[in-house]
Image (cartoon, grey):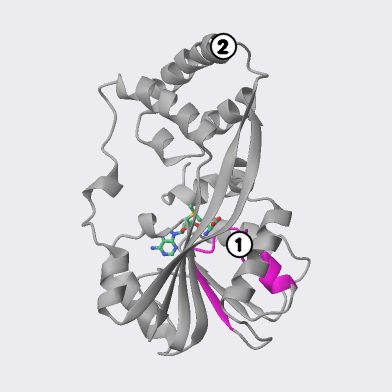
Amino acid sequence: MKKSNYYDNIAQIYDQTRWLTEPIADSIADFILDLTSATPETSFLELGVGTGLNVIPLVRRGYPVTGIDISSEMLEQFRQKFNVVPPQLTLIQGDASQLPFPDNSFDVVLTVHMLHTVTDLQVCLDHIDRVLKPGGFYLNCQWITPPARREFEGYFQDILSKHEEIKPNKNLEKPKIDVEAYLQQKGYVSNYLVAQEWTVNNTVEELLSFLQARAYGLCWRVSEEIFAQAINEFQEFCINNYGSLKTILSSEAKFEIWAYRAI
Ligand SMILES: C[S@@+](CC[C@H](N)C(=O)[O-])C[C@H]1O[C@@H](n2cnc3c(N)ncnc32)[C@H](O)[C@@H]1O
């Protein structure tokens, strides 16, 4: 029986379907520590922390890290990365729009590839502003999908779109707000930075297997039956388009940070 939360369903395969490797996460941690002029006492909160890909290097270096996530299974995957969860790491199952922390609790708040998943973005940003200490940093980060993978998923999306049964993308129905303008109006200054660029390689077969495991949101908007038809069609397309399922797709990934600081 499927669980109700999309991320609960994909938690076990989440890490392998992404492209943030441990060495890259380590150098991004260096970048963030430098950017925030962190001291050993600097406290971090990541909303939608998931399996911990971004903050594990901070935890391993002894920084106090709190992670909150709505998915119990994603948090469980995070916990399983340690024999014993270290005392400087606190993991809480909860909603990023209802943060259970007092005002002025954290030096740095992070969101990484997650704001698009929040139902009420404005309320979430209000909470971030509330729990940040004066002079603290909010880092809104994004690791963009490497272009070759985006193109690959686009081809699959085109095949799915031919089927009438496709359900609407709920993200498109959410009220839009301009995060930068909203935070500037609250008194934050912003700075855009690229923390890391690196090359990602995957075989077509590997990317196909991620789709077959329904690892991405676009795979959940059709019934099982339609999905099976679309995957068969797409596999044939891949062989024709890429020549072989063993073909390696290679392109550049980027970890971007929109850094906000209250003045
Ligand atoms: C794309 S994943 C990103 C996970 C992690 N930040 C990373 O970079 O690997 C989005 C995460 O946000 C969590 N999430 C979605 N909506 C949430 C909410 N309202 N409150 C807390 N977590 C949420 C999901 O469960 C998932 O773990």
Residue shown at the point (36%, 23%) measured from the top left: 158
Compared to 5, does 115 lie above or below? below
Residue 140 locus on image (x, y percent): 44, 65
Instruction: Please identify the quadrant where the C terminus is shown.
Output: bottom left
Residue at 61% over, 45% down: 19
Q: Which residue is mark 1?
A: 54
Query: Left or right: where does residue 180 sit relative to residue 45?
Result: left
> Could one spot residue 85 in this view of the protein?
no
Image position, residue 123 (x, y; %): 28, 72
Amino acid type, label 2: Ile
- Name which of mark 1 and mark 2 comes first in the sequence: 1
Corner quadrant of residue 57: bottom right
Residue 167 placement (x, y as % from top left): 28, 34
SS type, badge 2: helix
Above or below residue 150? Residue 132 is below
Q: Is residue 240 left or right of residue 38?
A: left
Amino acid identity at mark 1: Asn
The residue wearing badge 2 is: 239
Q: Which residues are magenta?
A: 43-60
Label 1 sits on a secondary structure element that is loop
Mark 1 in CB contact with mark 2 (< 8 angstroms) = no
The disc at residue 123 is none
